[in-house]
Image (cartoon, rainbow, N blue to C red):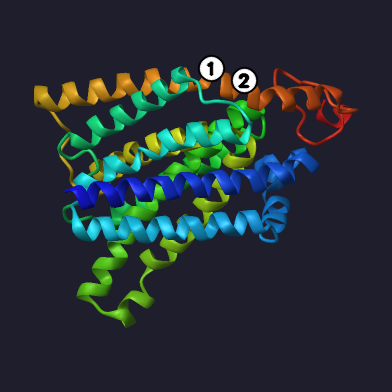
């Protein structure tokens, strides 16, 4: 158990550090081209990021995190490793503060701990991350279509909202993609174990795994570019298990919890997560993050607000 905890916490630290490095690289691009923080500017953002040494270091750190997490899963169970992954939020707060040359506020750390505690309680509820059982492939496809529509809706909505809201919407969309990647990973692994490589190569789960993972990674970069690191990590960390649970009910014949203990656990987890996320949304770090952006947006020539939403990269007359 000591080894599992050590590997799990190390993996969480590596993931948080990777996000910090990737966000620094993304923010450097946004400083030169503010529209790169938006979903329509993803192509510009990625073209610049792949040439950034900071971003590449972040990618390598992320890979090290995956390998460390895999080692933890070999030693312990998913139930023991998954809650440890939420501790990356505890590392994200001081990393964000260090990036802004500020000391982390005790209140921010407290709100991050509330989110981590809520996720730990959620994962402790039986069936909270339900990808066990025999999936119905037709229902998996239905869940995939529903998830794709929701991701597209969030991406479109993010282009019409303020950058603060947009960053959260994109992070939620990334979390949905990563949850679907777990579904396709399970199906692909089952294919490899029971049908072999040739059958797996011509089956659809492997290709959807690549597509969902790539989409999630792209949206994750947009979330890093548009919002504080703790916000992005919190939104993805909360969305992933919730989306996994919905897919489990829809496609894996998972029973909805009905006993008082499970319902109480889910309610407590929801309350802790909501309290923590609400606190992080109004934290001094978040306010400091957007202070410079708001000033730059107000000073930018030819930009104005239409119906409460910021400039979308088009002249004001065109937007009318």
Labelled pair 2, 1 in contact (Cβ < 8 Å): yes
The residue located at (33%, 55%) in the rendering is 69
Name of the residue lying farthest toward the bottom: 198
Which numbered disc, 2 or 1, marks the residue that appears first in the sequence? 1
133 left or right of 308 in image: left
| Residue 272: quarter of image | top left
Other-residue count near label 1 (Cα within 10 Å), few / some / many at <14 / 14–19 / ≥20:
few
Quick one: SS at disc 2? Answer: helix
Give how far across and how far down residue 298 sits, in percent. 82, 22
Residue 110 sits above or below residue 179 on the image = above
Give how far across and how far down residue 162 sits, in percent. 66, 26
Other-residue count near label 2 (Cα within 10 Å), few / some / many at <14 / 14–19 / ≥20:
few
Give how far across and how far down residue 236 sits, in percent. 44, 39
| Residue 314: quarter of image | top right
Q: Along the line of sight, which residue is nearer the eye, 217 or 308?
A: 217
The residue located at (37%, 51%) in the rendering is 11
How far apart are the alpha carbons under marks 2 and 1?
7 Å
Residue 191 sits above or below residue 4 on the image = below
Where does label 2 land, which residue? 287
Where does label 1 land, which residue? 282
Residue 50 sits above or below residue 91 on the image = below
Residue 124 shows in the view? yes
Q: Along the line of sight, which residue is nearer the eye, 126 or 62?
A: 62
The residue located at (68%, 57%) in the rendering is 52
The residue located at (44%, 50%) in the rendering is 14
Q: Quadrant of the C terminus?
A: top right
38 left or right of 155 in image: right
């Amino acid at each position: 158990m000591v080894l599992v905890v050590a590997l799990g916490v190390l993996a969480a630290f590596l993931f948080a550090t990777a996000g910090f490095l990737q966000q620094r690289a993304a923010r450097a691009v946004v400083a030169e081209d503010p529209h790169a923080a938006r979903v329509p500017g993803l192509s510009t953002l990625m073209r610049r990021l792949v040439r950034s040494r900071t971003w590449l270091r972040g990618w390598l750190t992320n890979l090290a995190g995956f390998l460390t997490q895999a080692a933890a899963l070999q030693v312990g169970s998913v139930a023991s490793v998954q809650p440890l992954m939420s501790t990356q939020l505890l590392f994200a707060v001081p990393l964000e503060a260090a990036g802004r040359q500020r000391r982390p506020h005790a209140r921010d750390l407290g709100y991050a701990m509330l989110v981590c505690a809520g996720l730990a309680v959620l994962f402790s509820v039986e069936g909270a991350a339900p990808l066990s059982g025999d999936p119905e492939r037709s229902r998996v496809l239905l869940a995939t279509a529903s998830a794709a529509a929701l991701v597209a809706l969030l991406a479109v909505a993010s282009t019409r909202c303020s950058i603060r809201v947009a960053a959260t919407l994109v992070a939620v969309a990334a979390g949905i993609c990563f949850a679907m990647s777990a579904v396709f990973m399970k199906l692909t692994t089952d294919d490899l174990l029971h049908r072999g490589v040739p059958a797996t190569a011509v089956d659809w789960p492997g290709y959807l795994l690549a597509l969902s993972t790539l989409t999630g990674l792209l949206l994750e970069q947009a979330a890093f570019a548009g919002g504080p690191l703790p916000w992005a990590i919190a939104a993805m960390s909360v969305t992933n298990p919730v989306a996994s649970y919905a897919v489990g009910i829809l496609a894996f014949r998972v029973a909805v919890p009905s006993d008082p203990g499970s319902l109480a656990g889910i309610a407590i987890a929801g309350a802790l997560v909501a309290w923590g996320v609400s606190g992080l949304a109004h934290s001094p770090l978040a306010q400091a993050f957007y202070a410079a952006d708001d000033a730059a947006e107000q000073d930018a020539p030819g930009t104005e607000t239409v119906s409460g939403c910021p400039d979308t990269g088009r002249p004001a007359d065109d937007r009318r």
